[in-house]
Image: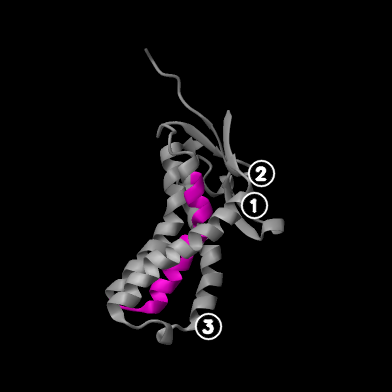
């Protein structure tokens, strides 16, 4: 199997670069449209929600990994890379690249994109702010998604057991 990985420290640096961009893209239009925001921000609600959402983010990865893995939840493990203070969810079984991409993106979509959209619709700055941070928290997943962008959807992917990224095997082309 071949490897597509990135250093945890590099992911954290890219995440720090992505975060202000996400803030600008999600928060600036809201503040322009509604001319309000910071005064309605409930920091206690946001802090509590973000702490819970970090765990839920990993559970969402686990849920989708369990859907695709033959052994279900038996193939899913959770942990924390303490030196980087990074929680993770790992699938110990191969799944297709298509399935892996879905498992990578779902936490960012469900906890990031949807709350931002909800915040714009109702309008509520707390939801936009929360979603914005959850999109930024998904930076590592987005980076891995980018790393595997060229894999065929049928490629077999195994979450790397020790690094950020994966191992993969692409099926041979039939001529």
Say whether residue 139 is visible. Answer: yes
Q: Secondary structure at mark 1?
A: helix
Magenta residue check for 169: no
Please state the horizontal and vertical placement of residue 24, each as a whole percent of the image. Answer: 41, 67
Please state the horizontal and vertical placement of residue 7, each as a whole percent of the image. Answer: 63, 46
Mark 3–mark 2 contact, CB under 8 Å?
Answer: no
Look at mark 2 in the image and give the residue it sits on.
162
Look at mark 3 in the image and give the residue it sits on.
44
* Image mark for residue 164: none
Precedes in sequence: disc 3 or disc 2: 3
Question: Against 9, is 96 above or below?
Answer: above
State the separation of the CA atoms marked 3 and 1.
Answer: 29 Å
Main SS, magenta residues: helix
Please state the horizontal and vertical placement of residue 2, each as a whole percent of the image. Answer: 57, 29
Residue at 53 percent of width and 52 percent of height: 140
Residue at 58 percent of width and 40 percent of height: 5
Q: Nearer the viewer, residue 140 or 73?
A: 140
Q: How many marks?
A: 3
State the separation of the CA atoms marked 2 and 1.
Answer: 14 Å
Q: Is residue 8 left or right of residue 115?
A: right
Precedes in sequence: disc 2 or disc 1: 1
Write down the region rendered in magenta.
122-144
Say whether residue 62 is visible. Answer: no
Which of labels 3 and 1 is toward the front? 1
* Image mark for residue 9: 1
Magenta residue check for 129: yes
Mark 3–mark 1 contact, CB under 8 Å?
Answer: no
Q: Secondary structure at mark 2?
A: loop
- Image quarter where the N terminus lies is top right
Residue at 44 percent of width and 33 percent of height: 151
Question: Against 2, is 148 above or below?
Answer: below
């Amino acid at each position: 199997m071949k490897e597509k990985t990135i250093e945890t420290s590099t992911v954290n640096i890219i995440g720090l670069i992505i975060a202000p961009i996400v803030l600008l893209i999600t928060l600036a239009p809201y503040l322009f449209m509604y001319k309000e925001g910071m005064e309605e921000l409930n920091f206690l609600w946001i802090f509590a929600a973000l702490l819970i959402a970090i765990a839920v983010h990993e559970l969402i990865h686990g849920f989708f990994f369990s859907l695709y893995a033959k052994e279900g939840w038996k193939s899913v493990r959770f942990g924390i890379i303490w030196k980087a203070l990074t929680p993770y969810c790992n699938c110990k079984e191969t799944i297709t690249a298509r399935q892996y991409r879905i498992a990578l993106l779902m936490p960012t979509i469900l906890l990031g994109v949807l709350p931002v959209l909800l915040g714009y619709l109702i309008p509520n700055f707390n939801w936009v702010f929360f979603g914005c941070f959850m999109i930024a928290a998904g930076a590592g997943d987005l980076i891995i998604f980018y790393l595997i962008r060229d894999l065929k959807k049928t490629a077999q992917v195994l979450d790397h057991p020790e690094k950020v990224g994966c191992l993969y095997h692409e099926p041979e082309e039939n001529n």
